[in-house]
Amino acid sequence: MCGIAGLIDPSSSEADARAHLQRMLDLIAHRGPDGTGLHTAPGLALGMRRLSIIDLEGGSQPVWNEDQTVGVVFNGEIYNYLELRRDLLAGGHTFRTQSDTEVLVHLYEQLGDGMFARLRGMFAFAIFDTRKNRLLLARDHFGQKPLYYAHDGARFAFASELKCLLALPWVSRERDPDAFLDYVSWLSLPSPRTHFRSVKKLAAGSFLAFPLADMSAAEPRQYWSYALTAEPDLTTLDTAVEALDATLRDSVQMHLRADVPVGVLLSSGLDSRAIAAYAQELQPDGMQTFTVGFGGEESETKGAAETAREIHSHHHTLELTSDDFLQSIERIAWHLDEPVGDPAAFAVLKVCELARGHVKVLLSGEGSDELFGGYDTRYLGMLTTLARSDRLRGFAPLLPSPDAASAPSRWQRLGARAHQTRASETLSLRLEGLPGDVRTPRGLTPDQLRRLRQRTDEIAESVYRPQRDTLSELLTLDLDWQLAESLLQKADKMSMGASIELRTPLLDLRVADIAARIPSALKLPPGGPGKFVLRHCLAHKLREPLNRPKRGFPVPLAQWFAGPLRGPLEDALFAPNAACLAYLDRALLRAAWDDFLSGAWDGARTLYALWLYEIWSRSLAK
């Protein structure tokens, strides 16, 4: 686990390139406090910061092949590296280390750009092929590891964190107004967009390869996407449970591979309890679990402690307060790199800090909801709405098409939906931020609401993919956007901010393949509950109830924002130089704030996203 960075600048001297690279690496020292590695040549500099997990003594990077013609800097873990190493040794390759990193250079030698089909892991890496004078960048299948890049035609740079690119004098800091509108509406940005016009993020399951002599060829290509198009064949509950049980056990076993202690991030929810139960079976002695809570009935600590007692883990708990949140929010914004409106980032940062005193690796349960249908309330509501709209769309030629920004009545909204595509309406139903409910949009002007409808259509064309049924379309949309660019961004940035490696056994290609073979009716039966197969998979492992409500480290924002944090939040949002007021109407924002205080609007998460944007603007982007 590391942070990587690099630049190609033919006009720069080797000394200048090394100096720029060192500044980039200094900004991500938290990602790799155990060491630094650099490679420089005229016009080229590649480097990394290392958090040593496997082959503690011999895994320093860059790692090269036998004749020093192919080198790699790598962030992540290749969990099937032992199996790949065995096959590569049989094929005549020579290894000098015991690290998982080295399999990448030899696999590239053998398969070139076809190497990704063999990798089970999380990764962002850069391979430099001196024979072809070629650079290859790649991001893992699900997007667990981030990778940003900037290209001005004559120069190219990449890094694990966006802040590294902003340290380069030629990378513009010009903001993208549409990015703010996307963020305030959906609370995260789909790839490749960032808040800066000059910086892009490589999409999950994509790679970018080009000769150094022709940087104009630096265009991303997708090597993998999750598809739910084939007919499922695990059509009975028993066969689905049997297949998932064996595959998930295998995945957890691989994710436990490390030369340092491994623990489990434990909430009261089903996903982390599943990971903890499998991990405890595989390592029955000394498993450590960690959780944080906030007091009150919604706290994770009670349920997590019950699970820890049942699986006999060494459990660690930390209770957090509004003062802890206030003291942490600047650090959260700085580590996130680009604002993501998920307040659970605070809990993840603090639980990783708690764990850092005991272990170096944590397992977590991210990915289950998107693979197995976990957001049951939202999905069931969207399925009903979309089915109704599909019937309406047949009458669209007979219905007027009202402006969605001025369609207050139910019949006008129905008419507007009839003229929307299925993809566009699905994205409209996924709006989480300031516009809120389409019946009572808050905070945006009519012109912004019209532009939001255009952005909805534009984004839908790039992120919505037809699948075998409607639930499958909702799952793949969440996997491509919410999981890759919100949940996994939060998980990566907060864990690395605490110098912890966070691993997600549910996001394994073989687990995903099992999920793809299970029909929607076994993931989310009519009326729920979601993750039906996973629940039955755990029924023989855990005695505790498997139907606890989904919480996900619920930070009590509404209570804090109306109480002890009201002053700091209000000061940030309505300061004369507030960054969000460059895009939002002050009076409309004030009205939304008043609605929140009166209880008319449940907008705590949106207000958090705006507060985070303010702090991020000051600390990172100024």
Image: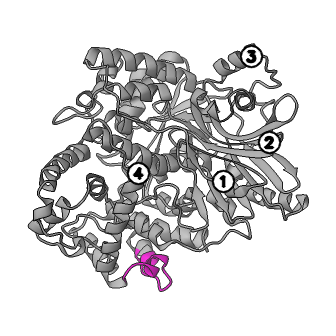
| Disc 4 to disc 2, C-alpha distance | 34 Å
Residue at point 72%, 70% (across, down) = 170
Q: Which residue is mark 4?
A: 463
**Which amino acid lies under the numbered mark 3 shown in the image of this protein?**
Gly
| Disc 4 to disc 3, C-alpha distance | 40 Å
Report the span colored magenta. 570-585
| Disc 1 to disc 2, C-alpha distance | 15 Å
Q: Is residue 483 left or right of residue 547?
A: right
Label 4 or label 2, whichever lies nearer to me, is 2
Q: Are marks 3 and 1 in contact (CB under 8 Å)?
A: no
Dot 2: what SS?
loop
Q: Which residue is mark 3?
A: 91
**Which amino acid lies under the numbered mark 2 shown in the image of this protein?**
Lys
Q: Which mark is residue 218?
A: 1
Dot 4: what SS?
helix
Q: Is residue 293 above or below residue 541?
A: below
Label 3 or label 1, whichever lies nearer to me, is 1
Q: Is residue 53 left or right of residue 601?
A: right
| Disc 3 to disc 1, C-alpha distance | 32 Å
Residue at point 77%, 43% (across, down) = 128
Residue 33 visible in the displayed image: no
Q: Is residue 187 above or below residue 224?
A: below
Neighbour tally class for label 3: few under 14, some 14-19, many 20 plus, Cα within 10 Å: few
Q: Who is closer to the viewer here, 30 or 235?
A: 235
Q: Position of residue 591 (x, y in %)?
A: 28, 79
Q: Which mark is residue 132?
A: 2
